[in-house]
Each structure stands twice: as structure tokens, then as C-alpha cells.
Image (cartoon, helix red, strand yellow):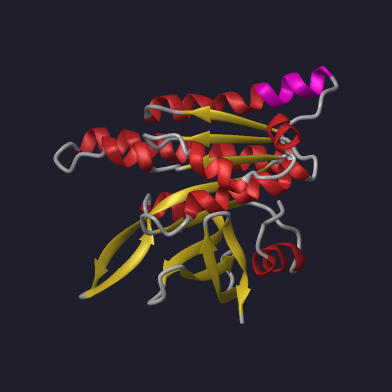
Amino acid sequence: MDFPIKQIDDFFNSIDTFEGITSLWGDFGVGKTTLSLQTAYINALSGSKVIYIYSKPNFPYNKIDSVIEKNLDEVLDNILFSKAITFEVLLNLVFNLEFIIIDDLKNGDRTFNLVVIDSITDLYGLELQQDKKGKNFILNYKLNQMLANLTFLNKKYHVDVLIVNELSRKTQEGQTYEVERGGKVMEYWVKNSIKIERTDKLNHRKFFLMKGKSNNSLVFYTRLNKQGFEEDLK
């Protein structure tokens, strides 16, 4: 998977074999969809086939127009956009991905190199209910199965997987921490992490990268404009 920011690209693609699910997460409005669209764009531009599953209420037509400025027809030929309106629909889309890949391979066609899900937990969060532990258990089970299937696709078919996730907070021993929504399910399945944070400057963003379960990490700053993220700020 190629990324539109050199720092991210170098970090994940130069250490060792890049594998596993990559999560792009942060607070509302920090630019997660913009970066995921930029990533889909540059991979499609290089000839990769991309499936982009969107699960939020309003499809980001304006952001797509802003990010995909050049070679529009060529790029859109390589990106399949799909919309999930419920968590169950999202689950079915993910489980049908292997059938699409197998059909492509049987027909001798190019198959998908990258799957982007924006967002993996938005619809999941809408269905969670504090007073219904049985329903929440089932939702967590389905989220676990979804991530397991994406991991399987990554390993068996060498399909890169980028998931957008929301920020949550947990309190432990009097301290509040920012974590990914999905708790221990996400901790288990996600191998690589890209967290975006706001700074005290309006359009500047702080990135925190983490690779695998090791101590490999990187922090850098960049600027967000209408067309997307620029190169890193020195």
C-alpha cells in the first residue's frame, strides 16, 4: 500500500514486509476520510484496483472531487465505491469480498489490491446500547469476525487493508486515555496504526505512527488543505 505522505510511506514500507490491517483513527473532523481518499487515489493512479466502502451518512462527493483532480477517468476505473447503510450490510460486504476476488482470479482479471473501509465502527457504534449486554456481545462478535476475515484476505490474497476508525476514551486508575473504538477487538487484530491529532494551529495536524506490537513509532506534523494533506512540516 502506498501513502500520499512520504513519512508514512517510508515508515511502513521500508522497515520490513508490510502486512496486516492498518487503522487510521482520530477525533471527528481531523481528516481521516481525506487521507483515506488520498491513499485510494494514489494506489489507483499506479494501477492498483481499490474497493472503498463508505459507512457514514453523507457520501463524500465534494472530498472526492477535491482529492481526485487529475486522471479522473483512469483513477475512477480502478476504484469501486460502495455504501453500507447498516452494520449488517457492512458485514455482508466484507464477507463477500473473497467471492469477488475468487471470481476475478478465475476469469483471469485483475483483482483488488486494496480495501478501504471508512469507517469500520461508525455503524457499529450506532447499534451499541449500554443496557443491552446481549446485543452488544453479538455486535462485538460480528466486529471480531469482520476483522478476522479482512486479516485472512490480507494474508491469503495479499490484499492491503486500511480501516478508518473513531476515537474513544477509557479511564483506568484515574487516568483517561484515547483509544480506538472497538476496544480489545481492535487491539487484537490491528497491526499498524496511524493516529491523527489536531494542534493549536488551525490546519496543522500531528501524526503518530505505530508498526506492529513493537516499539517502532514515529511522530511528525503536516498541513491539511482543501486538496488533502501536504508533505510533512519540518
Q: Considering depth in this image, is 192 or 201 the residue closer to the camera? A: 201
- Residue situated furthest right in the rendering: 108
Compared with 107, 141 (above or below) is below
**Residue shown at 72%/39% (left/top)?**
113
The reply, left or right, for residue 124 in relation to residue 81 is left
For residue 103: magenta? yes
**Residue 216 in view here:** no
Q: Considering depth in this image, is 31 or 93 the residue closer to the camera? A: 31
The magenta segment is 100-107
The reply, left or right, for residue 203 in relation to residue 94 is left
The reply, left or right, for residue 86 in relation to residue 234 is left
Residue 114 in percent (x, y) is at: 67, 41
**Residue shown at 74%/62% (left/top)?**
13
Residue 219 in percent (x, y) is at: 55, 76
Which quadrant holds the C terminus?
Answer: bottom right
Compared with 16, 75 (above or below) is above
Q: Is the magenta region chiefly helix, strand or loop? A: helix
Compared with 3, 57 (above or below) is above
**Residue 116 in view here:** yes
For residue 182: magenta? no
**Residue shown at 80%/40% (left/top)?**
47
- Residue situated furthest left in the rendering: 131
Q: Considering depth in this image, is 125 or 16 the residue closer to the camera? A: 125
